[in-house]
Image (cartoon, grey):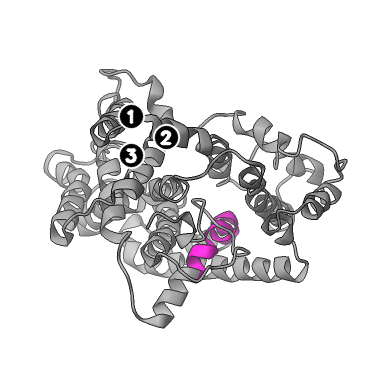
Amino acid sequence: MNNENENTNLCNFEGGVQKACQTRILGLDVIRSLAILFVIAGHFFVLHTPFGSTNFEGLSLFLQAGILPLFYTGVPLFIMLTGYLNINKVSSKKYYRGIWKVLIAYIFFSILTIIFRKYYLHEELSLFKLGLKIFDFSAIPYAWYIEMWIGLFLFTPFLNLLYKAIPTQQQKIVWIGILFTMTAIPDLFNRYGFHLVPGFWQICFPLMFFFIGSYIKEYQPKIRLLYGWGIIMICCLINPTFNMLFIHNHSLIQIAGGSSGVFGTIIAVIFFLLVYQRDIHVPLIRKVFTKVSLLSLDIYLCCYIFDAIYYPWFKEHYFINQSQFGIFFFVIIPLVFISSLILAQVKEWLFKIFKVNLLWNNTSTSTTSSINKVFSLPSTANYKLLFPVISVWRTGLY
């Protein structure tokens, strides 16, 4: 599986406008589909319910704390997919032209979200000021990831040169181990007023996951099913078990760290290894995973709208406390996911009707001229990539 065209998902998020090629690696589609579901589910705990401030007690809170580390893997899984699928990318006009499909999708959903925030949420900002938020990636509150992704996209050909310049497998393991030490270890030890290890490079965790994805692509490692799930279960139960035994009358203490910490990294990598080579022979299920995978970017960009619709309504009418996890979670998450999927599909249809996808699917000079016309740029402009270059370092990697 050395052909990068085996799967059309050559970026961690892909818009629905991209056509599926004849040969797809279904395991990668499954990972991407579950990753976007994990992101939406993670928002339930981190952003929209008082899970973090609720006293940790009872079976319901134990189960929530146990499943949350798995949902934290959404972003790491996407970044590992980027490293896996882009390992052979080189610096070229054709490669960098591919950024338009993400930027245009981002602008489309940013405008839609601005209209939603102005006329549904009644935010007291002018349309002009809301429009300016497109450029600092705050029009969509979840768009920090797009800002990070732009930098990773621009760096990818040169990260590949660095990776391929490392001559042996052992040295590549050492390289990834160094990245793990500098980005994951600080999350475990530098907390609660302690600073025990250097933490400056912790912000570069996307590089660690990117190179892990590249390594998996090159060497195709495997892990036994029961062994892998056993490790994941142990890592997921560290937080709730510790809090149940030693913490009382207090909210959950995250001794195991976050998504890019030691145990979060272990969970994400093992989950990737368990799934990436899996196949499903039921045609309908294959089609579902393929469709969700192709629409994952659009689902991510529009899910904020449905979060902002459903969560306030449920809280106003039904919410009493965090122990009602089962009543809310298994209703709201499917609602947000399915609603986002439908809107993403509508966007795909619109882009096909107006042939927006031709702006990046065709690499001819005429298409480049079309891009220039759409964005009112001179046909001889050499600054077509100026927007992403300026944007990527505004706030750095999150």
> Residue at horizontal 51%, vertical 38%?
156
Q: Is residue 237 left or right of residue 384?
A: left
x 75%, y 54%: residue? 364
> Cα distance, mark 3 to mark 2?
16 Å
The correct choice, above or below, for 297 with respect to 91 in the image is: below
Disc 1/disc 2 C-alpha distance (Å): 8 Å
The mark total stands at 3
Q: Nearer the viewer, mark 3 or mark 1?
A: 1
Do tag 3 and tag 1 residues touch (Cβ < 8 Å)?
no
Residue 179 bears which disc, if any? 1
Q: Is the C-beta separation of discs 1 and 2 under 8 Å?
A: yes
Question: Which residue has dot 2 on it?
Answer: 207
Instruction: Out of 121 and 295, give the one closest to the viewer.
Output: 295
In the rendered image, which quarter contains the N terminus? Answer: bottom left
Q: Position of residue 245 (x, y in %)?
A: 11, 43
- Is 164 above or below relative to 95? above
Q: Position of residue 207 (x, y in %)?
A: 42, 34
Helix, strand or loop under label 2: helix
Name the residue type under label 1. Leu
Range covered by the magenta-colored residues: 291-307
- At mark 1, the secondary structure is helix
Residue 54 visible in the picture: no
Asked whether 193 falls inside the magenta stretch, the response is no
Main secondary-structure element of the magenta-colored stretch: helix
Q: Residues within 10 Å of mark 1 (few under 14, many from 20)?
A: many
Of marks 3 and 1, which one's residue comes earlier in the chain?
1
| Residue 185, position as x, y percentages in the image | 27, 29
Q: Nearer the viewer, mark 3 or mark 2?
A: 2
Q: Which residue is disc 3 drawn over?
A: 258
Sequence order check, earlier mark of 3 and 2: 2
Which amino acid type is shown beneath numbered disc 3? Gly
